[in-house]
Image (tube, rainbow, N blue to C red):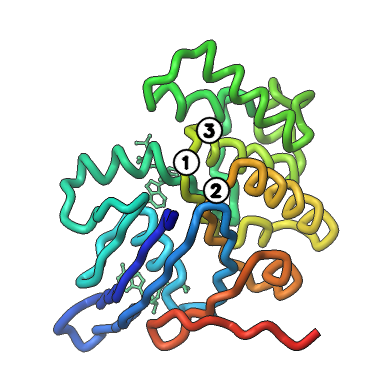
Amino acid sequence: NTVLNLTGITKVYNKGAQSEVQVLDGASLHVAAGEVVALVAPSGAGKSTLLHIAGLLDTPDSGTVQIGGEDMTARSDRRRTLTRRSEVGFIYQFHHLLPEFSALENIVLPQLANGVSRRDAQTRALDLLTRVGIAPRARHRPAALSGGEQQRVAFCRALANTPRLLLADEPTGNLDPATSDQVFAALMELVRDTGLAAVIATHNPDLAARMDRTVRLENGRLVAETPAPA
Ligand code: ADP
Ligand code: ADP
């Protein structure tokens, strides 16, 4: 039951120019439903490129991207966009919430764009906010929320359309250590509840240790990190 299959992904920027850089060089990753994978990578290693390719925001030069067993590599842009909206949730280091809308509306809007009725979208948004412990903040705009609360709303938004795959890039990287710890716990609970496949990039070894396994992006490839002996 593999949700994400990346096989032999290569990506070169500025091909043929002096500034040519081979970012990915045969990267492969398979993530099953319910599995949470920590992605660790030195800065500039190609982490963002890899996540964008996995989330159908970018295309590889070669290799295949399968989501839910379906090969997306040769699909039209339109088809890839539809699959991205319904199957993939993104979380970034900064929340990117719409400032003029409430927390609730930020979670409702992506559902409306996906064809869900307003009534159902609101019910789902409130349920998600309840699960991350901030339902009382539903009517507040992002600026009125703490950093940890803003990130919780961003998690709810990412899961609004019940994706099968969650891609997160340093989801708690902008928070102080204590808040980061709590917010990460809320995220893991949400992910475990929904049985999502998740790839979560982090520089924090403590957070990585709380996921199922760790892969390291190194020289354009993904290598399994052996757990330290207990
Ligand atoms: P990371 O997220 O690990 O910091 P990125 O995937 O953002 O790495 O970038 C990896 C490398 O590719 C870096 O050297 C970066 O400068 C380069 N790069 C990223 N995007 C582009 C682009 N659009 N054009 C040219 N080079 C790029
Ligand atoms: P919409 O068309 O409804 O705005 P998209 O299908 O363009 O949504 O995007 C789906 C998801 O991909 C959103 O979570 C959005 O944040 C993310 N996304 C879209 N474009 C980019 C981009 N260039 N870089 C990073 N994330 C993006």
Badge 3 local density, few (<14 within 10 Å), some, or many (20+)? Answer: many
State the residue in front, 195 or 23: 195
Vertical position of residue 71 compared to residue 84: above or below:
below
Q: Residue at x 85, y 58 (%)?
A: 178
Vertical position of residue 213 compared to residue 104: above or below:
below
Q: Earlier in the sequence, mark 3 or mark 2?
A: 3
Q: Quadrant of ligand 1?
A: bottom left
> Which residue is labeled 3 in the image?
160
Q: Which mark is residue 6?
A: none
* Circles 1 and 2: CB atoms closer than 8 Å: yes
Total numbered labels: 3
Q: In the picture, residue 52 is in which quadrant?
A: bottom left
Quarter of the figure with the N terminus: bottom left
User: What amino acid type should be assigned to the residue bearing mark 3?
Assistant: Ala
How far across and how far down the image is residue 91, in percent? 54, 50
Label 2 residue SS: loop
> Which residue is labeled 1 in the image?
163
How far across and how far down the image is residue 71, in percent? 24, 55
Q: Using the numbered discs, state the Cα–Cα distance from disc 3 to disc 2 in whole angstroms.
A: 13 Å
Q: Using the numbered discs, state the Cα–Cα distance from disc 1 to disc 2 in whole angstroms.
A: 8 Å
How far across and how far down the image is residue 73, in percent? 22, 58
State the residue in front, 164 or 117: 164
Label 3 residue SS: loop
Vertical position of residue 44 compared to residue 169: above or below:
below
The label nearer to you, 3 versus 1, is 1
The label nearer to you, 3 versus 2, is 2
Q: Is residue 224 left or right of residue 138?
A: left
How far across and how far down the image is residue 216, in percent? 53, 80
> Which residue is labeled 2 in the image?
196
Whether disc 3's CB lies below 8 Å from ligand 2 is answered no
Name, please, the residue furthest toward the front. 1
